[in-house]
C-alpha cells in the first residue's frame, strides 16, 4: 500500500462507515479527522407502513422502486407489523421490483425476493428513469417509491410527467448529530486551511456542514475555503450535484460511486491537487503537505 497521503490532513464526514473510511485513508498515510455530519433516525412508527402493506397484499400497486438497502429492510420489517411475512412475500413477488444498486437487492434477498430491474451505475434517479423507459414504461402504472431520508422530487415529478401514479413512503430520516463539536472543529480546520482534503459521501453532508457553519457565522468562509484551498472529494453524481447546489465545486469524483474507489482516487490525485489549488489561489502550502513531509 502506498503512503501517498502521508502528511495530509483529510476530513471525513461519514457516519455509518466512519471506521471503514478512516481505516482506508490511514492505509494511504493520511491523518484523518472524523467529524460525522449525520445521524440516522429510523422512524419508530412509519405512518405509511400499513397503507404500503395493504397495497402490496391487495394488489393496488404495480411497481416498487427501492432506493437504499437500509430503507428497504426497514420498510419490509415495518410492513410485517401489519401483514404476515408470507402475505407480503407473495404480494411483492407479483410486483415489478426496481432496485437502485446492489444494496436494495441484498435486502430483498433476505426476504427471498429478487429484483425485476437492476439500475446500473452510477445509480442516480436518472438511471432509474432510463431503465424504466427502456424496460418497463410507466404510463398508467401505479408506482411506489421507498424514500431515503430526503424526498426525491425530481424522480417523483419525472414519473408523474410520464403518466405514472406515484406515491412515496419515507422510511427513515437524517438529523444532525447531538454532539456537533467535531463538525465545528472540522469547520475551523477548513477555514484555516489546516485540512488538505475533505470527503463527502452523501448529499446531506454538505447541507449539515453549512448549517452548522452558518450557526457560528462561518458558512461563507467554508464555501470560500472549499473552492480555493481545500481539495473536495465527492463519492458520486448525486453528492456532486448537492455540492454544486450549495456553491461548492468538487475536485475529485471517482469513476464508480463507491467508497473504495473514492479513497483510491484521493490517494492518486489529492497531493498534486492541493498544491495546484493553493498555488492557483495564492495560498501558501504548509510544509507538511510537501512531498510527504
Image: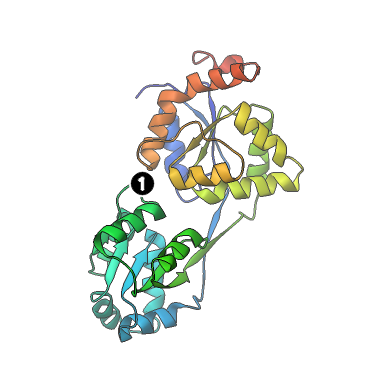
Q: Which residue is mark 1?
A: 122
- The relative height of residue 96 versus residue 79 in the rendered view (above or below) is above
Looking at the image, how many numbered discs can be counted on the residues?
1
Seen at 44% across and 29% down, the residue is 266
Residue 77: quadrant of the picture:
bottom left
Task: Indicate whether 71 appears above or below 5.
Answer: below
Out of 182 and 218, give the one closest to the viewer: 218
Can residue 130 be seen in the rendering of this structure? yes
Q: Residue 135: x and y, percent?
A: 24, 61
- Indicate the position of residue 88 as horizontal and vertical percent values: 30, 79
In the figure, 91 relative to 248: above or below?
Answer: below
The reply, left or right, for residue 83 in relation to residue 172 is left
Q: Could you classify mark 1 by the number of other residues whose Cα lies within 10 Å: few (under 14), some (14-19), or many (20 or more)?
A: some
**Could you tell me residue 137's position as x and y percent?**
29, 65
Residue lying at 23% horizontally and 64% vertically, measured from the top left: 116
- State the residue in front, 218 or 168: 168
Q: Is residue 222 left or right of 82 when viewed as pictured?
A: right
Q: How is the image coloured?
A: rainbow
At mark 1, the secondary structure is: loop
Looking at the rendered image, the quarter that the N terminus falls into is top left
Q: Residue at x 39, y 78 (%)?
A: 79
Relative image position of residue 91 (x, y in whole percent): 27, 80
Is residue 36 visible in the rendered structure shown here?
A: no
Q: Residue furthest right?
A: 217
Between residues 167 and 256, which one lies in front from this camera angle? 167
For this rendering, which residue is in front, 30 or 115? 115
Amino acid at each position: 500500500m502506498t503512503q501517498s497521503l502521508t502528511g495530509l490532513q483529510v476530513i471525513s464526514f461519514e457516519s455509518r462507515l466512519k471506521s471503514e473510511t478512516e481505516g482506508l485513508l490511514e492505509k494511504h498515510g493520511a491523518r484523518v479527522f472524523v467529524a460525522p455530519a449525520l445521524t440516522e433516525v429510523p422512524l419508530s412508527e412509519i405512518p405509511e407502513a400499513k397503507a404500503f402493506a395493504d397495497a402490496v397484499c391487495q394488489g393496488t400497486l404495480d411497481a416498487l422502486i427501492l432506493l437504499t438497502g437500509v430503507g428497504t429492510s426497514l420498510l419490509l420489517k415495518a410492513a410485517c407489523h401489519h401483514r404476515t411475512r408470507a402475505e407480503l412475500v407473495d404480494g411483492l413477488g407479483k410486483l415489478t421490483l426496481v432496485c437502485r444498486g446492489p444494496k436494495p437487492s441484498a435486502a430483498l434477498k433476505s426476504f427471498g425476493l429478487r429484483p425485476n430491474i437492476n439500475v446500473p451505475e452510477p445509480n442516480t434517479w436518472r438511471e432509474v428513469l432510463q431503465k424504466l423507459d427502456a424496460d418497463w414504461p410507466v404510463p398508467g402504472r401505479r408506482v411506489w417509491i421507498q424514500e431515503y431520508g430526503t424526498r426525491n422530487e425530481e424522480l417523483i415529478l419525472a414519473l408523474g410527467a410520464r403518466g405514472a401514479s406515484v406515491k412515496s413512503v419515507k422510511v427513515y430520516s437524517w438529523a444532525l448529530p447531538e454532539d456537533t463539536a467535531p463538525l465545528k472543529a472540522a469547520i475551523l480546520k477548513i477555514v484555516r486551511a489546516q485540512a488538505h482534503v475533505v470527503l463527502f459521501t452523501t448529499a446531506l453532508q454538505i447541507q449539515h456542514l453549512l448549517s452548522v457553519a452558518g450557526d457560528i457565522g462561518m458558512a461563507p468562509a467554508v464555501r470560500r475555503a472549499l473552492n480555493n484551498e481545500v481539495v473536495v472529494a465527492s463519492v458520486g453524481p448525486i453528492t456532486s450535484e448537492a455540492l454544486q447546489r450549495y456553491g461548492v465545486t468538487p475536485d475529485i469524483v471517482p469513476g464508480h460511486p463507491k467508497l473504495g474507489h473514492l479513497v483510491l482516487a484521493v490517494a492518486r490525485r489529492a497531493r498534486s491537487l492541493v498544491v495546484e489549488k493553493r498555488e492557483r489561489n495564492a495560498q501558501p502550502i504548509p510544509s507538511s503537505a510537501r512531498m510527504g513531509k
